[in-house]
C-alpha cells in the first residue's frame, strides 16, 4: 500500500520501484518482481538492483539472463564479494567453470574470510584437477572459528587431496556431527569410505545424501562409481541413465557409462559413448584444438591425408596403433601419426605410416582431416570378435639394438642362463585407478626368491623400492631406457614380463612377448571380466584380484605358475 502511494506521487522513483520488486520476489511473484526491478534499473542502474533482478531471473530459471545481470552487478561494484560469489555460482551452474573459478578468486581477494566461497572454489579447482589451488582454498579453514561444520569439512577435503583418507574420515565425521542433515557432507563421508576401499559403507552414505537431495548428480555419480567397483554393473548403468534424465548435458556420466559398457563387452555402446570425453573437463586427454575437420569414419578419405594423434597415454597409443595400417588398406588414406617423443622411434617404421612426428612439432605437416588414435575402434566398428590382430603390427626391434641389450644383460648375469623376467609394479601415479592397480615392490617379494634372473623395467622407482631392488639383486638398466624402441629391444631379450597395467604391458603384448598382467578387482575396461586371456594380445595372461582386493593371493598364484615355467626352462 505504501509503495502504491509513493509511486502515485512519483512513478519513476527508483527505490520504490525496487522495493515493490522485492515485495513481489518474497511473495514468489517472480515475473512481476523482474518487471518492477527492471523499471528501477532504467531509472537508476545500481548494483543492488541488478543483484535483486538476478535473483528473480534465477527463480524463473532464466539462468543465462541472470548470468548477464550478476555480471553487471559485479562490474558496478567490484568491491562486493557477495556479487562475485553469486556470479561464480551461476557460472558454475551453467558449466562455465573457468569463469566461475575467476569469479570466486575475485570474491576471495575482496573478502579472504568468505568461507563459503573458499569452499566452492576449492571444489571447483579440485574437479578441474588444479590441486594446489584447491588445497590453498581448503586450507583457509585454519582461520575459521570453531563450531562451524565448514571448518572440519574444509580440513577433511584438504586431507582428501593429500590422500590422507583415515585422518580425513575423522574430520568429515566431525562435520557430519555438527550438521547431520547436510546432504553434501553425507556425500563426502561416502567418498572417504570409497577411497579406503569400503564401497559398501560408501553406498550407505550416498543413500543418506540422496534421501536429503534425491536428484544430486554428484552423489548419484559417486553411487554409480561404487556400484561399478562392486561389479553391480546393471545398477550402475541405471544410475547413469538417471543422471542423463536429470541433466541431459552431463557428459561425464555418458563417458563413465561408456567405460562400464566396454568393460562388460558391450563395445557398440562403449565406443560411441566414449566420444563424450571431449566434453568432460579435467580428463587427462590432449585436446589438440586442430583446425582441420575431424573424421570418425563417415566420409570417404581415399587419397586424402589424415592426421592420427595420440590423445591419451602411451599404452593406449600402442594398443590402438594396430588400426593405423588399416586406414591405408581399407580407406586408401595417407597417414601422418603424431605421438609423444618416447613413442616416435617405436612407431616411425610402422606399415601404413607415411610420416611419424613428435606431438611437439609446430607447425604440423599439412593434412586434410584428423582423428584421435583412441577413436579408431569406433571408426572400424570394433566388436569383441573383430578386434584386429594383436601380433605383427609393431616393427620388431632392430638387430643392432637387440645385440646391445643382450650384451648388457650378459655382462650382468654371467654365463649361466636362467629364465629372464622383467618386472613392473607401479604405473603413472596420476592414473585415476592407480591406487588399485599399483603397489610397492615388496609385494613381489614372494617372486624374487625364485630361481630366475629378474630385470627391472620400472622407471624412477621410489626410494623404498630402490633399496629392495639392490638387496634382491634385481638388475636395473632403466637408465638406458630412453624411449619405447629401447624398451622394446630389452623386452626382446627377456623370456617373460610380469607387470601391472602399464604401457609396458601393452608394449610387451604387442611385441608378442609372454606377458603376465596383475589386475585389480575392477580392472581397466580393456581387460574385460572373468577371463585369464586378452582378445587384444594373444600372448598375455591375466591374473586378477578377487573380491577381497588382495594382491597377496594374486602374487601367490603367479609364483606357482612361475615355478612350473622355471622347471620347464631348466630341463
Image (cartoon, rainbow, N blue to C red):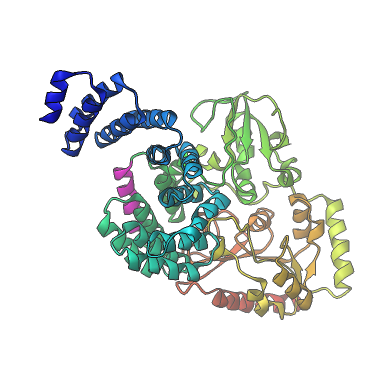
State whether residue 389 appears in this view.
Answer: yes
Report the predominant secondary structure element of the magenta stretch.
Answer: helix
Residue 246 in the magenta stretch? The answer is yes
Q: Which residues are magenta?
A: 234-247
Q: Is residue 36 left or right of residue 284?
A: left
Q: Is residue 59 left or right of residue 393?
A: left
- In depth, the one of 448 and 378 nearer the eye is 448
Estimate the x, y position of residue 382 in percent, counting from the top left: 50, 44
Q: Quadrant of residue 182?
A: bottom left
Which quadrant: the C terminus?
Answer: bottom right
- 217 in relation to 540, above or below: above
- In depth, the one of 325 and 286 nearer the eye is 286
Estimate the x, y position of residue 18 in percent, counting from the top left: 24, 28
Residue sitting at 86 percent across and 70 percent down?
Answer: 412
Residue sitting at 33 percent across and 32 percent down?
Answer: 48
Identity of the residue furthest to the left in this view:
1
Amino acid at each position: 500500500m505504501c509503495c502504491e502511494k509513493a509511486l502515485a506521487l512519483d512513478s519513476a522513483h527508483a527505490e520504490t520501484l525496487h522495493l515493490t520488486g522485492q515485495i513481489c520476489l518474497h511473495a514468489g511473484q517472480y515475473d512481476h518482481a523482474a518487471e518492477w526491478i527492471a523499471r528501477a534499473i532504467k531509472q537508476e542502474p545500481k548494483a543492488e538492483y541488478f543483484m535483486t533482478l538476478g535473483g528473480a531471473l534465477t527463480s524463473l530459471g532464466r539462468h543465462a539472463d541472470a548470468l548477464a545481470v550478476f555480471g553487471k552487478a559485479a562490474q558496478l561494484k567490484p568491491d562486493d564479494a557477495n556479487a562475485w560469489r553469486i556470479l561464480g555460482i551461476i557460472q558454475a551452474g551453467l558449466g562455465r567453470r573457468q569463469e566461475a573459478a575467476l569469479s570466486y578468486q575475485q570474491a576471495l581477494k575482496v573478502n579472504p574470510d568468505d568461507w563459503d566461497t573458499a569452499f566452492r572454489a576449492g571444489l571447483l579447482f579440485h574437479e578441474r584437477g588444479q590441486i594446489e589451488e584447491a588445497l590453498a582454498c581448503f586450507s583457509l579453514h585454519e582461520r575459521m572459528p570453531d563450531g562451524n561444520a565448514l571448518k572440519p569439512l574444509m580440513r577433511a577435503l584438504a586431507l582428501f587431496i593429500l590422500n590422507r583418507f583415515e585422518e580425513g574420515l575423522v574430520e568429515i565425521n566431525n562435520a557430519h556431527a555438527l550438521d547431520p542433515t547436510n546432504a553434501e557432507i553425507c556425500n563426502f563421508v561416502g567418498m572417504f569410505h570409497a577411497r579406503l576401499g569400503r564401497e559398501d559403507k560408501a553406498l550407505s552414505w550416498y543413500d543418506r545424501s540422496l534421501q536429503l537431495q534425491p536428484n544430486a548428480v554428484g552423489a548419484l555419480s559417486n553411487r554409480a562409481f561404487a556400484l561399478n567397483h562392486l561389479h553391480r554393473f546393471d545398477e550402475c548403468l541405471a544410475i547413469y541413465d538417471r543422471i542423463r534424465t536429470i541433466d541431459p548435458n552431463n557428459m561425464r556420466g555418458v563417458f563413465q557409462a561408456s567405460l562400464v559398457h566396454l568393460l562388460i563387452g558391450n563395445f557398440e555402446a562403449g565406443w560411441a559413448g566414449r566420444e563424450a570425453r571431449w566434453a568432460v573437463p579435467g580428463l587427462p586427454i590432449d585436446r589438440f584444438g586442430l583446425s582441420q575437420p575431424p573424421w570418425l569414419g563417415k566420409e570417404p578419405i581415399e587419397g586424402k591425408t589424415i592426421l592420427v594423434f595420440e590423445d591419451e597415454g602411451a599404452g593406449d597409443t600402442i594398443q590402438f596403433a594396430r588400426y593405423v595400417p588399416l586406414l591405408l588398406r581399407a580407406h586408401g588414406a595417407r597417414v601422418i601419426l603424431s605421438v609423444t617423443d618416447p613413442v616416435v622411434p617405436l612407431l616411425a617404421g610402422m606399415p601404413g605410416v607415411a610420416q611419424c612426428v613428435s606431438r611437439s612439432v609446430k607447425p604440423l605437416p599439412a593434412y586434410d582431416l584428423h582423428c584421435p588414435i583412441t577413436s579408431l575402434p569406433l571408426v572400424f566398428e570394433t566388436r569383441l570378435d573383430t578386434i584386429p590382430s594383436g601380433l605383427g603390427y609393431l616393427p620388431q626391434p632392430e638387430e643392432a639394438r637387440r645385440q646391445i641389450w643382450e650384451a648388457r644383460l650378459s655382462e650382468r648375469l654371467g654365463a649361466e642362463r636362467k629364465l629372464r623376467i622383467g618386472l613392473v609394479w607401479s604405473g603413472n601415479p596420476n592414473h585415476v585407478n592407480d591406487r588399485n592397480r599399483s603397489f610397492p615392490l615388496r609385494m613381489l617379494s614372494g617372486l624374487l626368491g625364485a630361481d630366475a634372473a629378474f630385470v627391472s623395467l620400472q622407471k624412477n622407482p621410489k626410494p623404498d623400492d630402490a633399496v629392495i631392488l639392490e638387496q634382491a639383486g634385481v638388475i636395473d638398466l632403466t637408465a638406458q631406457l630412453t624411449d619405447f624402441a629401447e624398451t622394446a629391444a630389452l623386452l626382446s631379450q627377456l623370456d617373460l614380463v610380469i607387470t601391472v597395467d602399464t604401457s609396458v604391458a601393452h608394449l610387451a603384448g604387442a611385441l608378442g612377448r609372454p606377458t603376465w598382467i596383475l589386475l585389480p578387482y575392477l580392472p581397466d575396461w580393456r581387460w574385460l571380466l572373468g577371463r585369464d586371456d586378452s582378445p587384444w594380445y594373444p600372448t598375455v595372461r591375466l591374473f586378477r584380484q578377487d573380491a577381497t582386493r588382495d594382491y597377496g593371493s594374486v602374487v601367490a598364484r603367479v609364483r606357482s605358475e612361475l615355478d612350473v615355467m622355471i622347471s620347464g626352462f631348466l630341463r
